[in-house]
Image (tube, grey):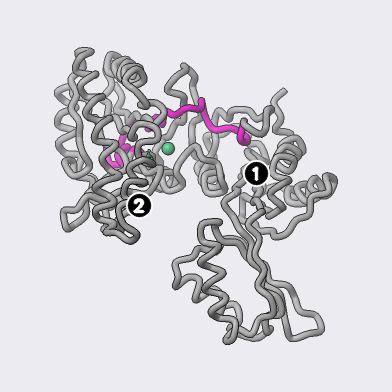
Amino acid sequence: MARIVMKFGGTSVADLERIRNVAGRIKAEVDRGNQVAVVISAMAGVTNQLADYADQSAELYDLREYDVVVSSGEQVTAGILAIVLQDLGVSARSWLGWQIPIRTNDAHGNARIEDIDVTEILRRFDDGQVAVVTGFQGIDAQGRVTTLGRGGSDISAVALAAALDAERCDIHTDVDGVYTSDPRIVAKAHKLDRVTYEEMLEMASQGAKVLQTRSVEIAMKHRVRVRVLSSFENSSGTLIVDEDEIVEQAIVSGITYSRDEAKITLTRVPDRPGAAAGIFGPLAEAAINVDMIVQNVSVDSDETGITFTVTKADLERAVKVLEGLRDSLEYGDLLSDPNVVKVSVIGVGMRSHVGVAQKMFSTLAEKGINIQVISTSEIKVSVLVAEEYTELAVRSLHSAYGLDAA
Ligand code: ASP
Ligand code: MG
């Protein structure tokens, strides 16, 4: 007997037919004698629709009410799934976030889970009951409903698995696992049987959409064994594990890309202490996240150029903030370019092998792709290039690191 958490995303519960399919999978686990907690999303597209309703009701609105609206999609699927399970003869009940409760802070729209009280769920496991839990939602100290940010049902699932001390957290989605790159643009991408927490974390934060980034952080912290698999096919999926559980570790495990970046350059910035602080301080105050940064060395002048990236959504605001600082910062020109993409090469093997970055640079050079900004971490190299080269860059790198499927 094992205790498992099964999570089903929006496409897996998109209609009644699919909810029946999901119920069948849950029943199979129950019949194997397992204790099962299920975490579900809203039906595909529903949360977008609900968010649109909120956006259209007023220009500025109370985020506590936004959370009431957008959390409702999960209530529908949890109730229906519980009904369908009962109809199959499986003992089950639905749980809204506040009923458990899943306690969060009060950052409405993007709340963090603080604590999950699993006492009652555990008690009912002993009676053979399945817990059907709404993903994406919780309750704050004021008793208000909160949501965890878009894609947050992955977070609910992993956090619940940690709280239940579950043996596995199976994330069922519309793909059959984690791939070496996006199969929609790299036909030769292949599924990874195993990937380390750290690699998965980099992949998620560098653009791979298969898991919500924060859910991977929680999995890594609590050592939850997460498996990503398809809810439509029977395959073993991808297991996310500790590095020492992977026998033959490839140097590079994946190539990701993110079109979510935009580039800003400030020219002729005075080269003096406090210049960078003068730029990035006000951006941080405006809650604008800066990702990559390069500052040119000034050889024989007392001015320098600074280039950095923000998300496309923040570009307009960032430009406004910087325009407001023109007089105090005394920079020359402010240039912005939304037509860029960040391409990243990820692998824990980088720690022990030299030449990984060099291979990336030479591969891109051979294709005539100019690198605009570079950033690295211990297990990742990212470059910013013109958006029109996305496919070419990702495919060439995938081949260059020997990731193409035979
Ligand atoms: N339904 C929520 C969303 O679409 C949460 C999730 O599906 O993960 O963002
Ligand atoms: Mg999702």
Amino acid type indicated by mark 2? Asp
- 353 or 235, nearer to the observer: 235
Mark 2 residue crowding within 10 angstroms, few (<14) / some (14–19) / many (20+): few
In the rendered structure, which disc, 2 or 1, sits on the residue that comes first in sequence? 2
* Label 2 element class: helix
Is 160 in the magenta? Answer: yes
Q: Position of residue 402 (x, y in %)?
A: 74, 34
Question: What residue does disc 1 label?
Answer: 349
Q: Position of residue 295 (x, y in %)?
A: 68, 71
As drawn, the label of residue 55 is: 2
Is 92 in the magenta? Answer: no
Work out how far the residue at label 2 is from the one at label 1, CA to CA, in angstroms: 45 Å
Q: Tell me if residue 293 can be seen.
A: no
- 268 or 101, nearer to the observer: 268
Residue visible at 67% across and 68% down? 335
Q: Is residue 317 left or right of residue 381?
A: left
Write the start and end of the magenta stretch as one range. Answer: 157-183
